[in-house]
Amino acid sequence: MNVAIIGCGLIGNKRAMALGDAKLVACADINLNTAKGFSIKHGGIPFFENGEELLQSVDFDIVILAATHNALPQLIRKSLEYKKHVLVEKPAGRFFRELDGLNELAIANKCKVRVGFNHRYHPSFRKAKEIFQSGVLGELMFIRGRYGHGGRIGYNKEWRADPSLSGGGELIDQGSHLIDLSRMFLGDFTMSEGAACTYFWDMPVDDNAFLILRTATGQTAFLQATCTEWKNLFSFEVYGKHGKLDISGLGGSYGTERLSYYKMLPEMGPPETCIWEYPRSDDSWNIEFMEFLKDIREDRNPVPGIPDAIANLKVINTIYNKSGYDYNP
């Protein structure tokens, strides 16, 4: 299949390097020099300054959307109108209502839309999902997750600190991954409580978010996303009545990716423990794209898709509104 990429920054380049047997045939970026540099790096493919111009000018099957959050919903809509399959970066928009009608449009035009929550495809989470689905954890009780980095010089001047572009700060950025991963294990949340706060960075968006999310049956996810974590951290714990999964690290500055499975014994006390470590480079981007190709070839419903993005953004928008961050246009 032929692929085009709209958004030629860091994530666009990661996507371009993870296409498997698909072929990159064109790119676009609102910064024409960025698009040109991307084109040169990836074999001199045609490049454009405008996403719709690309859609009009090039024949391809799949478009990857890696633009700023504010641009994503309209790019999804335009891509579907041109009957392209879409892989859109999380969170797919700033507000859940921006995604209204997109799932129906995709179905009507026989297109697939997958939302790029690549953390689901880290090796530790693939193994954790396998263990969970085996039933050995028993009924799940709660999840505890933390995700943090410390920013960088000038972080408060980047596009993620501009609510008109991002729709929020750390909650919509890394927090959306924690919400998605929690939904993967627990399902939909019917209650969302928490606070988004700005403690350190001089910016109009949050640098910390604290969430308590509950399902209809009372299962709880207790989550924190922060960009005041001075040593990068990832920790995600899944607690069942018969055991626990503990995922830590994401590689690189987050430390070696590791999954620990703790099996509760009948006599209780110290659990049986199995540990898997994944010291190799992150292959989640490759695995996620291969899953998208399967969605298309096997006519599968992509998960996560637009309904998952809407559920994620409903939680995010609720917390922002309760915290006094009025980002709604």
Image: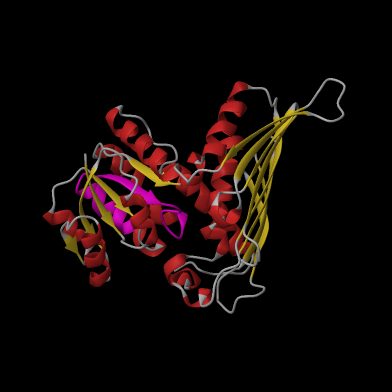
Q: Is residue 51 magenta?
A: no
Query: Residue at coordinates 52% horizontally, 49% vertically from top-left?
Result: 312
Residue nearest the observer in this picture, 95 or 257: 257
Q: Would residue 101 be visible to someone looking at this image?
A: no
Q: Is residue 94 magenta?
A: yes
Residue nearest the observer in this picture, 42 or 328: 42
Q: Would residue 29 be visible to someone looking at this image?
A: yes
Q: Quadrant of the N terminus?
A: top left
- Looking at the picture, how far across and down is residue 86, in whole percent? 30, 46
Q: Is residue 285 above or below residue 154?
A: above
Query: Residue at coordinates 14% horizontally, 55% vertically from top-left?
Result: 56
Q: Quadrant of the C terminus?
A: bottom left
Q: Is residue 312 above or below residue 295?
A: below
Q: Residue furthest front?
A: 279
Residue nearest the observer in this picture, 109 or 69: 69
- Looking at the picture, how far across and down is residue 19, in whole percent? 31, 43
Lateral position of residue 187 relative to residue 293, left or right: right
Lateral position of residue 54 relative to residue 294, left or right: left
- Looking at the picture, how far across and down is residue 172, in whole percent? 53, 59
- Looking at the picture, how far across and down is residue 242, in whole percent? 75, 26
Total labels: the figure holds 0
In this picture, which residue range is highlighted in magenta?
73-96
The image quarter in which residue 305 lies: top left
The image quarter in which residue 65 lies: bottom left
Query: Residue at coordinates 56% horizontally, 32% vertically from top-left?
Result: 127
Residue nearest the observer in this picture, 48 or 258: 258
